[in-house]
Every structure is written in C-alpha cells, then in structure tokens.
Image: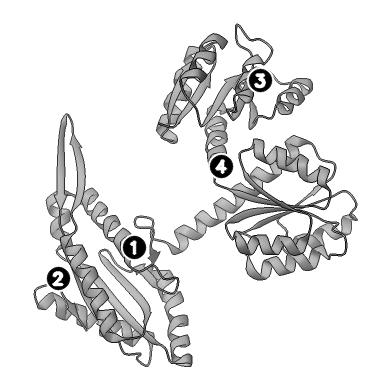
C-alpha cells in the first residue's frame, strides 16, 4: 500500500499532518519521531515520499534528510527557521522542496507541496538547450521535483518529441539555438498545441529585454534569465504547471459534466454542427442516437440520489468503453439522457453494435456497498436503456435531434429497453 513517511519530533505536528493528508489526499502515513525510528521504517517499507523536519533530537544537522535521499525517498523538508545559508544547504541535497514551519497557513502549503509532487510524477517536461551543462543542471532539478524529463539540443528534434509524446506538459526552451529561429519554433509549436496544452518557458542569458515581449506574444508562457537560482527555477516551473492545471480545470467545468466526465450539452451543440457540416460536404454517414436510462426516477426514489448518481457514472463508463473512436461525440444532454453523434458505414453493422450495447447494459450488474451507521449493505442494481436512432443526414442538426428524440419516445411506448430507428 502506498504511504507517505512523516518525520518530526513533535507529536502534535505528526498527528495534524497525518489527519490532513488522509482527508485531503487519501493516502495513509507512517509516523516517526527520531533518526533511530527512521532507520527502522526504511527497512520495513518503501514510500511515495517523505516530509521530514530538518532538526531531530538525534540528527540535528540534517542527517535524516541525507539518509532519506541516499535511500531514494523523495523528500519535502520542514525547517523551524529560515536563513540563506540553510536554504542553500537544503536545496543542494536534492530535495523536492522546503517549507518554513512558522509561515501563515503552513498546513495548506504542505498539502499543496505533497499534492503537487504526486502530480509531478505523472507530468512530462522537455528541455531544449544546446548546452549540455545547462541541460544536466535543469534535468537534475526537475528529476528532484519528480518530473519525467526528456531532453534535446535541437528545436527540430523538439517538434518530433512533442509529436511522439503529445502529453508533454511543459517545454524549457533556450532562446539561443544555433542555426534556429526560436520565435519561429514557438509559432510552429503553437500551430499544434495551445498555451494550456504545452507550456513554454524560454530561458536565456544573452537576450535583449525588448525581445522578451516578442517571445511572450509568440506563445511563450514565461521567461527566465540565466543564470538562475535553483529555487527560482523550481518556483517558475511549478507556477507554470499549476496555471496550466487551473486553465484545464476551468475548461473541464465549462465543457464537461462534472458527475460523469462526459461532454455536457453546451459542448455537444457547439461541436455537433461541425460534424454535420463535414458530413454534408464530404458525404459520409452520421447517426444521431439519444439514449435514456429507463425508470431512472424509480431508482432515485428507491435508493436515493447518491445511488442514482452511481448509476449515471456506471453508464457513462460503459458508454466510453463502447464508443471509443476519436470521432465519436458523446454527451450527457439531460438528467438521465445521453446523445451520441457518430460516423458509420453500414446501417446493419451500426444497429447490430447498438443492440450489443443495449444487451450489455441489460445484463450488467452494478454492485455498490452502502454503510448506514454500523450496518453494511451490498446492493446489486440492474437497469436498462431505451434508444432513438436517426440514421439519415437531415437538412439540419436540429432536425436530426428532433427525429432521434421522437424515436426514443417510440421506444418508451413499446415498453422500454429497446431501440427504434
């Protein structure tokens, strides 16, 4: 089981951090109060990361941190006081970050640092710099921060790497690359990736200040002058990644249904017309499918809205698994209503696949464990769906939706759990 190691000689601090990490991040912790207990803890288990006080009763000069780093445990350091010399000493050890205990809202800062570090483990960063020494320095810092790091010395190779790994979140780009135009390179990247998809931090020690706004207008997210301190580099990287996450979260809530994770009604009616126009222009076949969960009100009335939500999430999961093509547009367009807009080649094959999906849902059993005080109940819920399918490309998207909706109504009148086309 994944755990976080907490190392501090203050029992109160350990208890508070342990409780917060469990509540806000959902990860169990192991608590130790001295160096002797730390040695024992590392023999018995491995850890996602550690939060360690710099001063311990039997390790007053950071020996515990050295021991953790030596044993390859990523570490966030807590210090009781701050001074320039201590800061440099801590950062040189290769820690994730350090925090001063006395700052306001310190627990919030710790939870943020832990959450950020865990997200960093899944985050890819690309370094583009012709200086091997600079690449090594930045790579070391980023690895300490738990990022997955790629590197290259040429801009042309950078584009190839981005195409191969489109989930790269951030590029650290040196302004001066021999025989390459950095501004043109940024333009090329922005043709394929928006600013919230791949962040770009330009670094340079030989740039005129009037070029910085040019780079930012071309599509860079930030600029950092060389030489930079480790801490400034770390802060700029974390801030840029955090801003990308915030923008993506805002986009998620603008276009996604927060319960099911599917696209919402707004997104569907913005994107579906584009597909309809392409189908009209190039003559390919499109189907509009409206699906409704049968007797959903009865599920809510019998089991409660929380269980109803679980049914919706379960159905959305199966929708995603069955309709996986990039061109398939799937949205939750009503309470228990879902609309699909998908390409097809043969009518018979599509209807056969839809029937397979209907039957799969009919046979599916959703298992949910419910706790009421000291009682535990295992629920087994079955539900069915009805579909209305419009296979003809009508004169407008609105008309296709109307016809699909009428056919859904026919399915309900036939007794539900069926498909009308």
In 3D space, how far apart are the residues under numbered discs 3 and 4 (Cα atoms)? 21 Å
Which residue is label 4 attached to?
121
Residue 79 visible in the displayed image = no
Mark 3 touching mark 1, by CB under 8 A?
A: no
Tell which circle, 3 or 1, labels the residue nearer the N-terminal end. 3
Q: Position of residue 295 (x, y in %)?
A: 14, 63
Q: Position of residue 11 (x, y in %)?
A: 48, 12
Tell which circle, 3 or 2, labels the residue nearer the N-terminal end. 3
Mark 3 touching mark 2, by CB under 8 A?
A: no
In 3D space, how far apart are the residues under numbered discs 3 and 1 (Cα atoms)? 47 Å
In 3D space, how far apart are the residues under numbered discs 2 and 4 (Cα atoms)? 45 Å
Q: Which mark is in front, 3 or 2?
A: 3
Which residue is label 3 attached to?
66
Tell which circle, 2 or 1, labels the residue nearer the N-terminal end. 1
Residue 321 disc label: 1
Which residue is label 2 attached to?
417
Instruction: Please indicate whether residue 401 sits to the left or right of residue 195 in the image.
Output: left
Q: Mark 4 packing: few (<14 Cα in 10 Å), some, or many (20+)?
A: some
In 3D space, how far apart are the residues under numbered discs 3 and 2 (Cα atoms)? 64 Å
Residue at the image position 52 percent from the left and 38 percent from the top: 115
Secondary element type, mark 4: loop
Q: Nearer the viewer, residue 123 or 295?
A: 123
Instruction: Please indicate whether residue 357 sits to the left or right of residue 78 in the image.
Output: left
Q: Position of residue 51 (x, y in %)?
A: 56, 25
Tell which circle, 2 or 4, labels the residue nearer the N-terminal end. 4
Secondary element type, mark 1: helix
Tell which circle, 4 or 1, labels the residue nearer the N-terminal end. 4
Quadrant in which the C terminus is drawn: bottom left
Q: Which mark is in front, 2 or 4?
A: 4
Residue 99 visible in the displayed image = yes
Secondary element type, mark 2: loop
Q: Position of residue 135 (x, y in %)?
A: 77, 46
């Amino acid at each position: 089981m994944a755990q976080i190691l907490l190392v501090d000689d203050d029992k109160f601090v350990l208890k508070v951090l342990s409780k917060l990490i469990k509540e806000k991040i959902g990860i169990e912790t192991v608590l130790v109060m001295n160096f002797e207990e730390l040695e024992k803890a590392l023999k018995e288990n491995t850890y996602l990361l550690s939060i360690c006080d710099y001063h311990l009763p039997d390790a007053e000069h950071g020996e515990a941190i050295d021991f953790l780093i030596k044993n390859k445990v990523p570490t966030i350091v807590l210090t009781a006081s701050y001074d320039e010399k201590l800061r440099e000493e801590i950062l040189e050890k290769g820690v994730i970050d350090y925090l001063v205990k006395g700052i306001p809202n310190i627990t919030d800062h710790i939870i943020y640092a832990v959450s950020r570090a865990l997200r960093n483990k899944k985050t890819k960063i690309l370094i583009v710099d012709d200086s091997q020494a600079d690449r090594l320095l930045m790579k070391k810092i980023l690895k300490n921060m738990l990022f997955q790091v790629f590197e290259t010395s040429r801009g042309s190779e950078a584009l190839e790497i981005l195409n191969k790994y489109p989930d790269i979140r951030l590029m650290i780009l040196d302004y001066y690359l021999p025989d390459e135009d950095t501004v043109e390179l940024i333009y090329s990247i922005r043709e394929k990736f928006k600013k919230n998809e791949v962040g770009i931090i330009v670094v340079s020690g030989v740039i005129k200040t009037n070029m910085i706004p040019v780079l930012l207008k071309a599509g860079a997210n930030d600029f950092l002058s060389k030489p930079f301190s480790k801490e400034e580099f770390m802060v700029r990287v974390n801030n840029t990644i955090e801003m990308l996450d915030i923008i993506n979260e805002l986009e998620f809530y603008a276009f996604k249904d927060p319960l099911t994770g599917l696209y919402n009604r707004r997104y569907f009616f913005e994107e579906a017309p584009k597909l309809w126009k392409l189908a009209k222009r190039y003559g390919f076949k499109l189907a509009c499918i409206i699906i409704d969960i049968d007797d959903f009100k009865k599920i809510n009335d019998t089991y409660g809205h929380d269980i109803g939500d679980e049914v919706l999430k379960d159905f959305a999961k199966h929708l995603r698994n069955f309709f996986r093509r990039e061109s398939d547009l799937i949205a939750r367009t009503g309470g228990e209503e879902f609309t699909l807009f998908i390409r097809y080649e043969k009518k018979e094959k599509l209807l056969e696949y839809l029937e397979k999906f209907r039957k799969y849902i009919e046979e599916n059993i959703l298992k949910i464990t419910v706790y009421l005080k000291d009682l535990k109940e295992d629920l087994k819920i079955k539900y069915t769906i009805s579909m209305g399918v419009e296979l003809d490309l009508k004169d407008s998207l609105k008309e296709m939706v109307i016809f699909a909706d009428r056919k859904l109504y026919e399915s309900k009148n036939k007794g539900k759990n069926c498909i009308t086309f």
